[in-house]
Image (cartoon, helix red, strand yellow):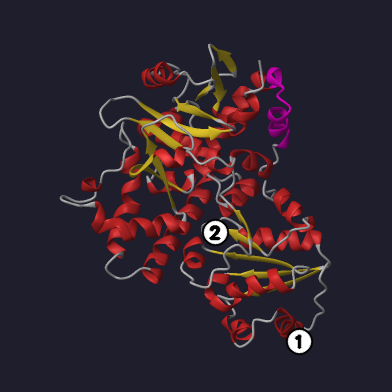
Amino acid sequence: MKRIVYHDLLVWKVSSNRKPLLLLGARQVGKTWLMEEFGKNEYKNVVYLNFEKQPMLSTYFDDDLSPVNILKSLEQHFNTTIEADNTLLIFDEVQESGHALNSLKYFCEEAPQYHIMAAGSFLGVSMHGSFPVGKVDRITLYPFSFYEFLEGIGKERYVEAIKRQDFNLIRATSGDYQKFLKTYFFAGGMPRAVAAYAERENLREVRAIQNDILADYRDDFSKHITAVNIPKVEMIWNAIPRHLSKEKKKFVYKELKSGARAYAYEDAMNWLFNTRLVYKIVRTEENKLPLASYANEGVFKLYMLDIGLLGAKAELDVTTALESNNELFGIFNGAMMEQYVMQELKAAGFTPYYWGREKGAAEVDFVVQWRNEIVPVEVKAGLRTKSKSLDVYRGLYHPAHTVRTTLKNFGINDGVYSVPLYMIADFSDLMHVN
């Protein structure tokens, strides 16, 4: 299985300014596998510490955070020699040991020649007061993107055709791309699900894995949340498919429970955001840079971390993915398509917002900052291309580039880039096409 961020890890390894690397991401997105795979391929020796499975390892960090003494203890425990250039030290589930997390600061300052990679949950790491601010490099790992999914199931040639912009070949095989995309909509990008599909192409097995992952997340609710917030977290978590099924997808608290107010659910909502099980896409009412400065944090849409898990939570039947028509793309008001585009934009390094006005019906699905401009991205189900909201936005702001993503082939008309859904991750590269 290939991951796009592997290249970033290679850059980190040879950087002259390398700091200990903190690999962040939601649970079960493949952090442990990636670290071990990178260590196996790129180093002569790997020393792996898991502070959740082996809590006693924390004792080597309790009394002395000097890198020299920590390394001596680890060499003795693991009966190995830790060479600066040839050994990768992996601190997994590092949030379980505040001292181990804090030790990254001292490795950065006193022993930068050592290669250390740590991983943990967003929530656990952020809650530690000992977080080594400014002393670590950070990379976020997301579920498999569509391109990673294609490579994972042995369809690398389809990704290569997109990367070299072979539009004639892409157009000729567009039916294949749509078939694979439809499979991805159901299978999603959680590594266990992708691996199972790659091996046996059994979507029912994939769905069983997704349900197991959802069950594991529910177990996390009871382990890591105060008793008063558990029902609130579950209420928000369970409401996401219903929330996305609406034509206007702005999250409204009173739809959780009659009389519900934001302040009563703030802690529960923040817990879901901090675990990255849920993404908050905030509304901006302006067309000014930087987008973050003009966003209204109180008005937002909610999406799940993975499209496959969204389908499992919504109990979409496997036959929907197996049928020959494109029903899956437009199901519950295009929610699956929006979820997919949000994921692809995040994985491509963008921070998406959406545009709308407090008074007015127009609403553009996403806007992103690209170079020194704001690019609106409208998502349309199937082959439909008409969008009154996008017309309103263009009339107000006259953007240099506009993206509309559908199942249609790539094309440019009056400044609007029609980008096929299966190419949306590369929309910025397509801006150079005339």
Residue 158: in magenta span: yes
In percent of width and height, residue 410 lies at: 60, 19
Image quadrant where residue 131 sits = bottom right
Q: Residue at x 46, y 32 (%)?
A: 367
Which residue occupies 64% across, 46% down? 198
The residue carrying mark 2 is 28
Three-letter code for the amino acid on which mark 1 is drawn: Gln
For the point 56% across and 55% down, the residue is 29
Q: Is residue 232 left or right of residue 69?
A: left
The reply to whether the C-beta atoms of the residues labelled 2 and 1 are less than 8 Å apart is no
The answer to whether 318 appears left or right of 427 in the picture is left
Using the image as rendered, state which of residue 226 and residue 33 is in the foreground: 226
Please, which residue is most extreme toward the left here? 259
Percent across and percent down for residue 141 are: 59, 53
Residue 13 magenta = no
Q: Image quarter for residue 22?
A: bottom right
Q: Quadrant of the C terminus?
A: top right
Label 1 CA crowd tier, 10 Å (few <14, some 14–19, many 20+): few
Q: Is residue 358 visible?
A: yes
* Residue annotated with mark 1: 76
Identify which residue is drawn at 51% across, 41% down.
351
Q: Which residues are magenta?
A: 156-169
Q: Amino acid at mark 2?
A: Gln
Q: Quadrant of residue 329?
A: top left
In the rendered structure, find residue 174 and report the number of the disc placed on it. none
Along the polypeptide, which appears first: circle 2 or circle 1? 2
Q: 54 above or below 26?
A: below
Residue 318 seen in this snapshot: no
Instruction: Tell me if mark 2 has few (under 14), some (14-19) or many (20+) residues whose alpha carbon lies within 10 angstroms of its own.
Output: some
